[in-house]
Image: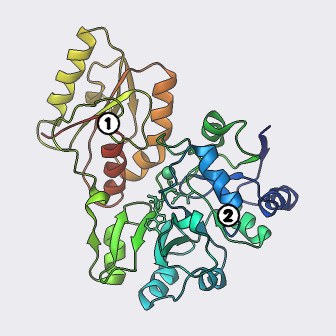
Amino acid sequence: MKTEILKVDKKKPELKKISYAAGIIKEGGLVAFPTETVYGLGADALNATAVRKIFKAKKRPADDPIIVHVYSINQVQELSEKIPTNAKKLMEKFWPGPLTLILKKSKIVPKEVTSGLDTVAIRMPSHPIARALIKSAGKPIAAPSANLFGKPSPTKAEHVKDDLNGRIDVILDGGYTNIGVESTVLDLTSKIPTLLRPGGINLEDLKKVLGKVLVHPAAKAEKKKIEVMKSPGMMYRHYAPNADVILVEFGKNRNANIKGIIAEYRAKDIKVGVISTTKNKGNYGANIVKFLGNKPEKIAKKLFGTFRELDKMGAEIIVVEGIETSGLGLAVMNRLRKASCRIIKV
Ligand code: TXA
Ligand code: MG
C-alpha cells in the first residue's frame, strides 16, 4: 500500500483535504492525524474490520483497547450506556482537550475497540484537524497513537512516516503536536474516579473538580524499582527508543550519579546520549547532549521526538534526568519509567 502524505493547515484545515481523508475513514481505511497530544491512527470506530486494521498496522496486541474520539456530546451518548454526573462536569471543564474518560459502553461499540471490555474510552480532542476530520467523517474515530507498538508516540508527521509508511492509507501532516504526551486516562466506572494514565490534564486539576481521585499503581509506573536490568524479551517497555534508557530519579545525588554512569559507559567506548534539564552543568560528559529546558511542559513536548533523534544519531545508551512528579511532571515520569530498562533511585 502506498501511504499518501497531505500537508494540512493546522489553524484552518483545508476542507477538500479533510473530506478526502474522511472519505477514506468512511470506506474503512486508516488515516493518521494530529491531535493536541500526539498523532493518532484513526479508523471508523463502528466498523470492526477497519478497527482490526489498526492493530495489524501498529503490530499492537489485541488485548490493548483503543480510545474513541468524538466531535459531539451526542456521539458520547451513542457510545456509552449512561453519562454519570462526574463525567458531565469533566466534559464541561476539560473538553475539547486531552482527557479520556472510561465509561460503560453501549451495544454499538464493537468488541475490537474495547478488547472485549464492557467499558469504552472516549475523548474529544481540541486540535482543529482532528475535530474537522471527525466532523467530516460523521462517525466517532477509534485512534491509538500512530506509532509501531512499543515505540515513542509520534509528535510530528515524519515520526508517523518512519513507523507506518506503506502500512496505512493517509497521513495528515499538521506539523508538531502541542502537548507531546498522550491524554490523561480516567476511569469513571469505579466507585471513586481512578487515574489510569497521567497525561495532558493534571491530577491536581482533576481533584479540583472531583475531590477524591485514586491513582492506579500503573499511573505511577514505579513497579520497576531500583536497578532493574533489562533481560531481552522479558521486560515490558513502552514509549521506548532503540537505545537502552537509564532513568536517574529526582533526588539529592541525581547529578553525581548521572556523571558516574556516563563515565562508566564511555570508558567502554559506548556512545551515550543524555537528556538534561540544566544547561551548562547538565552535559555530564556524554557524547550527545539534549537540553529540554526545566519546565515539565517543555520536556513533555520534546521528549518523544528527542528519543527518536538520539536513535538516529546512534546513541546506544540514553541517560535521562528524572524530574519532580507535580503537574505534568507525573505524565513525563510515567513515560520515562516505562521507557527505561534501568531505574536508579538516589
Ligand atoms: O492522547 C491520546 O490519548 C492519544 C491520541 C491519539 O488521542 N491516543 C493514545 O492512545 O494514546 P493509545 O492507544 O496509545 O493509548 C490508549 C490508552 C491505553 O493505555 C489503553 O489501555 C487505555 O487507553 N484504554 C483504552 N480503552 C480502555 C478501557 N476501556 N479501559 C481502560 N483503559 C483503556
Ligand atoms: Mg500508544
Nearest the camera: 327 or 102? 102
Which residue shows up at 31% across the image and 19% down it? 286
Left or right of 82? Residue 53 is: right
Q: Name the image quarter holding residue 337.
A: top left
Left or right of 298? Residue 123 is: right
Q: Amino acid at mark 2?
A: Ala
- Kindly tell me whether residue 125 is visible in this rendering: no
Q: Where is residue 138 drawn, in percent x and y?
A: 77, 73
Q: Where is residue 319 drawn, in percent x and y?
A: 30, 30
Q: Quadrant of the N terminus?
A: top right
- Kindly tell me whether residue 259 is visible in this rendering: yes
Q: Name the image quarter holding residue 40.
A: bottom right
Give the residue pinned by disc 2: 48
Residue neighbourhood size for the residue with mark 1, other residues' Cα within 10 Å, grouped as few (<14), some (14–19), many (≥20): few
Q: Amino acid at mark 1?
A: Met
Q: Where is residue 51 drawn, in percent x and y?
A: 65, 59
Nearest the camera: 175 or 244? 244
Which residue shows up at 20% across the image and 16% down it? 264
Which residue shows up at 50% across the image and 38% down it? 305
Nearest the camera: 155 or 44? 44
- The correct choice, above or below, for 294 with respect to 214 in the image is above
Left or right of 55? Residue 200 is: left
Residue neighbourhood size for the residue with mark 2, other residues' Cα within 10 Å, grouped as few (<14), some (14–19), many (≥20): some
Give the residue pinned by disc 1: 234
The numbered dot on residue 60 is: none
